[in-house]
């Protein structure tokens, strides 16, 4: 991925919902100006969520999602609805497509209640206005459109833009922590677990954020950090390290230089840093036989010393001295029922948008399960959490 690309996690997620054959996919195609979704007169043509990253004027970079009909039936229908509910957890703007001829259904009203419960900004698109003899007055959250003629589609785009600010989607990584012409040292291990010939997304985003602040990013491996610091000729305003090298880096970076990790910066950017700092205290209460959920937002090929499946479980058992059971989930799979778990340790969430990470966090909070993340858990177990969050004016 190039530094100029907008990651899916930083795009406005616009999802289309509705009953089968309300013309949902036709509206998606009309809004995007592309044949994004298959269109048919047969109910239930869309069988799985269809996702596409694109530039949608006047909004800019977005993720468009077309979902299966929420009134689907049978076992297959149940599975499709489950996927649709998962989409709701990462939806920034919801568009409910209703057949203007037949009107709202109980399913439509159920979807509206879900939008309201999850506090998702939404707009009701009354499709097939071309079949109406006259257009009735609309409510505040309703507009009439015609996927066939294109009428109302531009108005729809403008209304979407008013529902969510694209500026709010820009991740705040380090830009507000540093000043122009500052030095920021980024410690990036290059080992067997590192992706070949590229940097991982949080590292890319941090570099970009430093450059946009008119500061200088110095990228170095942990093996050269000690020798590099004196060569800079100026004390760095911040050192950011990969969590796996936290302990070594903390020993080599003087106490008067702020230090944190990419994972902790991601927790802050996704809006759950405070919750994660509070949640990590649950490590002290773990007992033999407790089940800990380790969750990763992406899927990747695991190396022999993988951080999620190997290192964190090893450090956790060594720190607590307890025989702790671990369950690992990755990608979009995240349990609805978290009651069996004594603690959730999440990755930084760089591949998930802010709404989905907060949805997972809220699910844990609602069920009384402590929630933290990789960087915070590692810093806590290494005894350096207080130092790693000091720059944010926080205390353990």
Image (tube, helix red, strand yellow):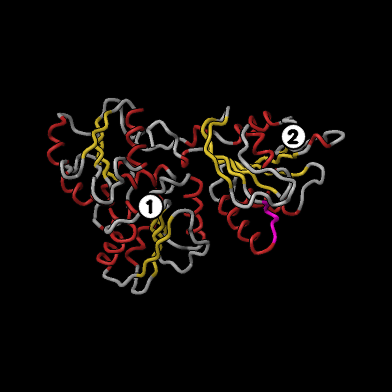
Q: Where is residue 272 in the image (x, y as percent from the top left)?
A: 43, 48
Picture layout, residue 339 above or below residue 39 = below
Quadrant housing residue 208: top left
| Residue at the image point whose x is 43% and y is 60% from the top | 329
Instruction: Please tell me the numbered disc located at residue 55.
Output: none
- The residue segment tinted magenta is 69-73
Picture layout, residue 393 above or below residue 74 = above
Q: Mark 1 points at which residue?
A: 300
| Residue at the image point whose x is 45% and y is 35% from the top | 6
* Helix, strand or loop for the magenta stretch, by majority: loop
For disc 1, the neighbor class at 10 Å (few under 14, some 14 to 19, many from 20) is: few
Camera-side residue of 24 and 389: 24
- Image quadrant where one finds the N terminus: top left
Quadrant housing residue 295: bottom left
Q: Position of residue 105 (x, y in %)?
A: 76, 51
Q: Name the residue under label 2.
A: 148
Picture layout, residue 54 above or below residue 181 = below
Q: Distance between the residues labelled 1 and 2?
A: 42 Å
For disc 2, the neighbor class at 10 Å (few under 14, some 14 to 19, many from 20) is: some
Left or right, 376 with respect to 351, comes to left
* Residue at the limit of the structure toward the right, as seen here: 133
| Residue at the image point whose x is 79% and y is 41% from the top | 100
């Amino acid at each position: 991925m190039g530094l100029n690309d907008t990651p899916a996690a930083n795009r406005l997620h616009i999802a289309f919902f509705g009953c089968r054959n309300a013309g949902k996919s036709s509206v998606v195609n009309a809004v995007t100006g592309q044949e994004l979704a298959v269109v048919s007169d047969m109910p239930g043509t869309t069988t799985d969520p269809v996702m596409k990253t694109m530039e949608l004027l006047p909004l800019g970079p977005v993720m468009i999602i077309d979902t299966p009909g929420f009134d689907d039936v049978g076992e297959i229908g149940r599975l499709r609805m489950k996927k649709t509910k998962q989409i709701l957890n990462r939806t920034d703007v919801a568009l409910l497509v209703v057949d203007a001829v037949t009107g709202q259904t109980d399913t439509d009203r159920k979807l509206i209640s879900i939008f309201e419960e999850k506090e998702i900004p939404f707009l009701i698109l009354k499709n097939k206005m071309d079949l109406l003899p006259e257009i009735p007055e609309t409510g505040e959250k309703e507009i009439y459109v015609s996927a066939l003629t294109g009428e109302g589609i531009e108005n729809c785009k403008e209304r979407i833009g008013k529902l969510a600010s694209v500026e709010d989607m820009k991740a705040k990584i380090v830009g507000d922590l540093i000043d122009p012409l500052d030095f920021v040292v980024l410690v990036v291990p290059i080992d067997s677990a590192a992706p070949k010939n590229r940097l991982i997304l949080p590292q890319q985003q941090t570099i970009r954020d430093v450059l946009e602040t008119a500061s200088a990013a110095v990228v170095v491996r942990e093996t050269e950090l000690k020798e590099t610091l004196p060569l800079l000729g100026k004390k760095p305003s911040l050192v950011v390290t990969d969590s796996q090298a936290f302990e070594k880096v903390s020993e080599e970076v003087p106490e008067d230089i702020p230090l944190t990790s990419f994972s902790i910066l991601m927790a802050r950017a996704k809006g759950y840093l405070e919750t994660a700092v509070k949640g990590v205290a649950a490590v002290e209460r773990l007992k033999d036989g407790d089940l800990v959920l380790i969750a990763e937002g992406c899927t990747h090929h695991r190396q022999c010393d993988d951080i999620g499946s190997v290192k964190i479980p090893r450090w956790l058992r060594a720190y607590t001295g307890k025989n702790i059971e671990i369950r690992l989930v990755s990608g979009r799979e995240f349990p609805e029922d978290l009651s069996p778990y004594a603690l959730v340790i999440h990755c930084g969430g760089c591949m998930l948008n802010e709404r989905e990470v907060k949805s997972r966090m809220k699910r844990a909070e609602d069920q009384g399960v402590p929630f933290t993340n990789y960087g915070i858990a590692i810093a806590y177990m290494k005894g350096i959490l207080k130092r790693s969050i000091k720059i944010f004016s926080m205390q353990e």
